[in-house]
Amino acid sequence: MRNMDFTEAMPILTQRLERGGVFLTVGGENPNTMTIGWAFFGPAWRKRLFIAMVRPQRHTFGLMEKAEEFTVSIPTTRPLKEELAFAGSRSGREFDKFQGHGLTAVPAQVVSAPIVAECGVHLECRIVNKQMLLGKDMEPAVRERCYPMEDYHMLYFGEVVACYTTDE
């Protein structure tokens, strides 16, 4: 394990978001992970932020609403295509994604939410704000293409409190 500067993780994170996604994990009695492919990250408010986008109909949404923290686990040495596909297409309401599906939840270093052991780069985040996207303020073409059901994402602003690699 080696601590990383958040800026060192940014290119890895960008590449994985664009090519298959990353795991967003929320803790609690029954931890849940989901695949995300849309996110924002960078400096704001004198903090380093990861902004996770979660739709209200997702099981993870209810967990995030109760959570104070989450983790982001980024596949590096193994693409984890099947695991990402499973975590992105099956609901945590019906499946424990950490039981028999190739993913292992292990304790994070700082936050209570676990990380995905099979990944090589991890962000641990403390939620500092949340904001629902508003369709009325959105470019019409984006609104029509990405939100035909008007199921806008909630944005969870997570301050990155730890960033590290487990590949080394």
Image: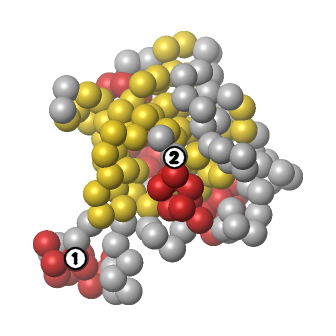
Horizontal and vertical percent for residue 69? Answer: 49, 39
Q: In the rendered view of the protein, which quadrant contains the N terminus?
A: top right
Q: 28 or 20, which is in the foreground?
A: 28
Q: Is residue 90 above or below residue 159?
A: below
Quickly name the residue at label 2. 67
> Please, what secondary structure does the residue beneath circle 2 have?
loop
* Residue 85 pos. (x, y %): 64, 62
Q: Using residue 154 as the reference point, say whether residue 123 is left or right of it.
A: right
Q: Is residue 19 visible?
A: no
Count of marks overlaid on the render: 2
Q: Residues within 10 Å of mark 2 (few under 14, many from 20)?
A: some
In the displayed orientation, state which residue is furthest to the right: 100
Q: Quadrant of residue 112?
A: top right
Residue at x-position 64% and y-position 36%: 114
Q: CA distance from mark 1 to mark 2?
A: 25 Å
Residue 135: mark in rendering: 1
As drawn, is 72 to the left or to the right of 138? Answer: right
Question: Residue most toward the front?
Answer: 66
Left/right placement of residue 96 relative to residue 59 reads: right
Vertical relation: 145 (above or below) 112: below
Sequence-wise, the earlier of marks 1 and 2 is: 2
Report which quarter residue 110 is drawn in. Answer: top right
Q: Position of residue 161 (x, y in %)?
A: 42, 25
Residue ID at (72%, 38%): 105
Q: Which numbered disc, 1 or 2, marks the residue closer to the eye?
A: 2
Under tag 1, what secondary structure? helix
Circle on res. 40:
none
The residue type indicated by label 2 comes to Ala
The front one of 77 and 101 is 101
Number of other residues with Cα within 10 Å of mark 1, as a class: few under 14, some 14 to 19, many 20 or more: some
Q: Amino acid at mark 1?
A: Gly
